[in-house]
Image (cartoon, rainbow, N blue to C red):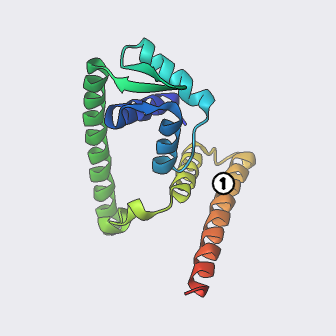
Amino acid sequence: MNKGFLRFAVLGIVVKKYPVHGYRIMELIEEKMGFKPSPGSIYPVLNKLVSDGLIYSETSGKRKLYYPTEKGKKIHEELESQRAELVNSHRKFAESLARLVGVKSKDIFPENFSSIPGIVKRHIGKVMLKLHKTNWKKGSHIDELISELNTLIEILTNLKAEVEKENEGN
């Protein structure tokens, strides 16, 4: 995960869920994003946010609890506003593109997107990133894309097997 994005995510959690400890931050990121960052990635981010004056910590028993500062709340509000504008801009672009090629925008942005398992969203994101970075004149790049697609297929196959197993019991 990009460090800048991780900083934004951690700051957002501290602003919205304070007081919160580092391990809980990792759990919340896992719930939302489908992967759990390591302590080696979270704690340096927390320390940087503290040194930048965006959050502060207090010790409670064996744990450090993190709280936002007023500066942190203000910065988060500004970033969240910019993120919302960016998402809206991307959505409008995608809807325009969909109309151009004759696809309904509801087919691109299904209403139940939030119900898609995090692991599937994460691997779709990896595939999209790999597509973006693929040099179509290099076989090794295409092999990497095929590998990422195969991983996604394996995940979907496993999810299907789990669903079928659950349905057998009903």
Residue 126, compared with residue 101, is above or below; it is above
Residue 25, compared with residue 3, is above or below; it is below
Residue 35 place in picture, x, y as percent: 56, 47
Q: Residue at x 32, y 37 (%)?
A: 16
The residue wearing badge 1 is: 148
Residue 83 place in picture, x, y as percent: 31, 38
Q: Residue at x 71, y 55 (%)?
A: 147
Q: Amino acid at mark 1?
A: Glu
> Which of the 4 quarters of the picture holds residue 38?
top right
The quadrant of the image that shows the N terminus is top right
Looking at the image, which is closer to me, 138 or 153?
Answer: 153
Horizontal side, residue 147 vs residue 45: left or right: right
Q: Residue at x 51, y 28 (%)?
A: 3
The secondary structure type at the circle numbered 1 is helix
Q: Residue at x 46, y 63 (%)?
A: 116
The quadrant of the image that shows the C terminus is bottom right
Q: Residues within 10 Å of mark 1 (few under 14, many from 20)?
A: some
Looking at the image, which is closer to me, 161 or 143?
Answer: 161
> Which of the 4 quarters of the picture holds residue 123?
bottom right
Looking at the image, which is closer to me, 43 or 135?
Answer: 43
Residue 24, compared with residue 53, is above or below; it is below
Residue 154 place in picture, x, y as percent: 68, 65
Residue 164 place in picture, x, y as percent: 60, 81
Residue 4, compared with residue 109, is above or below; it is above
Horizontal side, residue 169 vs residue 90: left or right: right
Which residue is most to the front? 61
Total marks placed: 1
